[in-house]
Amino acid sequence: MKNELVRLQETLYNSRTPTRRWLHRTRKDWIVQKLRRFAGEQGKVRVLEVGIGSGIYLPVLSGLFDKVVAIDIEDSYIDNAITMTKDFTNVSIIKDDITETGLEEKSFDLVLCSEVIEHIYDSNKAFAGMNRLLKNGCPLILSTPQPWSPLELLSRIAFLPGVIDIVRYIYQEPILKTGHINLMTEKELTRQLVENRFRIRERHKSGLYLPLIAEFAGETGLRLEKWVESRICKQPLDWALWTQYYVAEPES
């Protein structure tokens, strides 16, 4: 039987709630688009995924690149990834901590780190590790939540005693604590990337969650959220969008 953490992550992309499904699929679509772009560039042949999670990107990575290495420190994610990639001859699953990585220096043409850095106390060490592993001029694709987005703020309330029972009744799906221990603003994240000798090439934000509308207004509510998102994207209020994205590369 799959671990509860794995089942939760799989549910997020196929949720019966339109907004919940959209928030996660939008992020996946953006990242897959970037992976396909870089796969078309000469020399992008060996890639690393930092933080496997439910393995949502492993089939994509396997199909796009010659060699894929995926690391995690969570045994349940590793076990699930080994099972799902047993027929993928170009994928290696390794238990490794990016803050103290044992992988070879400057050995990867691309690093993917999606929804991981918020789970790491010492993100500076994680970024230093990724910089050490990436070849010069090669991309880091990064995504992480924004701390002041409505979804992050409301998730803290959702797990209060009594409230969580209501939330689980409404969603009728696995609901677990996010485990987010290191949420950073765009300013703080930018500072850490620069301090660890990354040059930022692209930025993006997406994902507006409107409480109650998301839960009870279905597809109509989702259309409203998409409309509001389009109005605040790249504007002063874009801190309210859930996910921030970066494409960066090590400075030579």
Image (cartoon, helix red, strand yellow):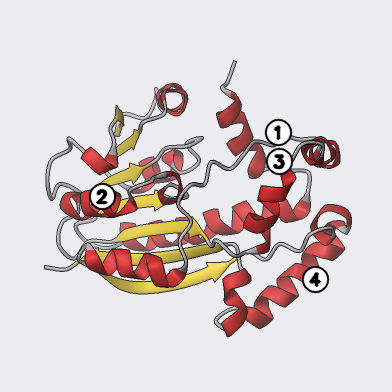
Q: Is residue 227 above or below residue 103?
A: below
Quick one: quadrant of the C terminus?
bottom left
Q: Is residue 36 above or below residue 238?
A: above
Q: Which of the two labelled residues, at mark 2 and mark 4, occupies the earlier sequence position?
A: 2
Q: Which of the two labelled residues, at mark 4 and mark 1, occupies the earlier sequence position?
A: 1
- Residue occupying the point 50% across, 61% down: 30
Disc 2/disc 4 C-alpha distance (Å): 40 Å
Category of crowding for the residue at label 2, using alpha-carbon neighbours closer than 10 angstroms: few (below 14), some (14–19), many (at least 20): some
Label 2 secondary element = helix
Disc 1/disc 2 C-alpha distance (Å): 32 Å
Disc 4/disc 3 C-alpha distance (Å): 26 Å
Q: Amino acid at mark 1?
A: Pro
Label 4 secondary element = helix
Q: Nearer the viewer, mark 4 or mark 3?
A: 3
Q: Which of the two labelled residues, at mark 1 and mark 2, occupies the earlier sequence position?
A: 2
Do the residues under discs 3 and 1 have CB atoms within 8 angstroms? no
Question: Mark 3 sits on what residue?
Answer: 159
